Amino acid sequence: MADFLINAFVTLFVTIDPVGLAPMFLALTAGASAAARRRIAARATLIATIIFAIFFAFGQAVLNVLGISVSAFRVAGGILLFLIALEMVFGKRNERKSETAERAAGDQNEKDLHDIAVFPIAIPLIAGPAAISAVILMASQAPDTLSYIGLGIVIITILCLCAIAFLLADKIERLLGDTTQLVVTRLLGVLLAALSIQFIAEGGVDLLQSVAN
């Protein structure tokens, strides 16, 4: 169980990237008061929690309704995570997130700042396609009930880290600096790539066995 939970934590931490979201949060909430930033951080984290809870609890049921096997989803989810890893290794992920943040920041005059908590902070910066895929994937792999509950705790922990990163965004950005952020992002990208290949390999083997049978 320990290995499963460690892999789940690493996968979700790398995919959601709480530390990397800190500068995005700063850009989106530029001009907001400290109190407003706290409210936005709390609302965004709550919304992302609800989204993850839905897919954590009913992701398997959704797959069953659509007639998608866990093995097929494991391969698809692994490919998606691998693409995210490539973006991280080659420096494209932060660039894409920055573009999303800038587009939303440009609309601040037309909407209330709190709407930004929904889009793009909660969706897709926190609960993006890759993160949702990872949640469904890991939930389907839980070997027992205790591991499944542990996965839920891991998800909550990651979301708490996101909230903390938002509240400490200005300090994190000054502490890490551009060079350190680039190095950490690329190292985590390599790690995520290895985990995604493992997902693809395991899912591919299961698919081949089901076809053979």
Image (spheres, rainbow, N blue to C red):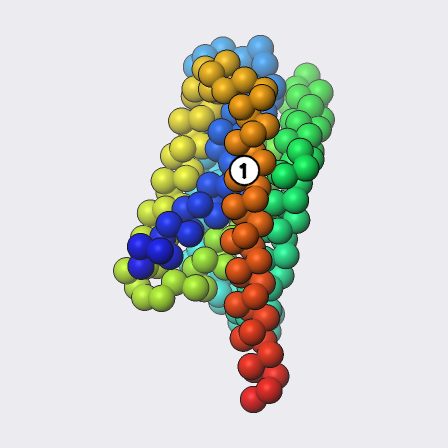
- Three-letter residue code for mark 1: Leu
Q: Position of residue 11 (x, y in %)?
A: 48, 48
Q: Position of residue 129 (x, y in %)?
A: 60, 48
Quarter residue 116 falls in: top right
Q: Position of residue 107 (x, y in %)?
A: 70, 22
**Looking at the image, which residue sits at the far bottom?**
213
Q: Residue at x 65, y 36 (%)?
A: 93
Q: In the picture provided, is 203 more to the left or to the right than 9?
A: right
Please state which of residues 142 and 3 is positioned toward the viewer in this rendering: 3
Q: From the viewer's perspective, is residue 150 above or below residue 103?
A: below
Q: Residue at x 59, y 28 (%)?
A: 182
Q: In the picture provided, is 116 more to the left or to the right than 48?
A: right
Q: Position of residue 132 (x, y in %)?
A: 54, 50
The kind of secondary structure element at disc 1 is helix
Residue pointed to by mark 1: 187
Q: Residue at x 56, y 74 (%)?
A: 205
Q: Residue at x 61, y 33 (%)?
A: 120
Dot 1: few (<14), some (14–19), or many (≥20) neighbours within 10 Å?
A: some
Quarter in which the N terminus is drawn: bottom left
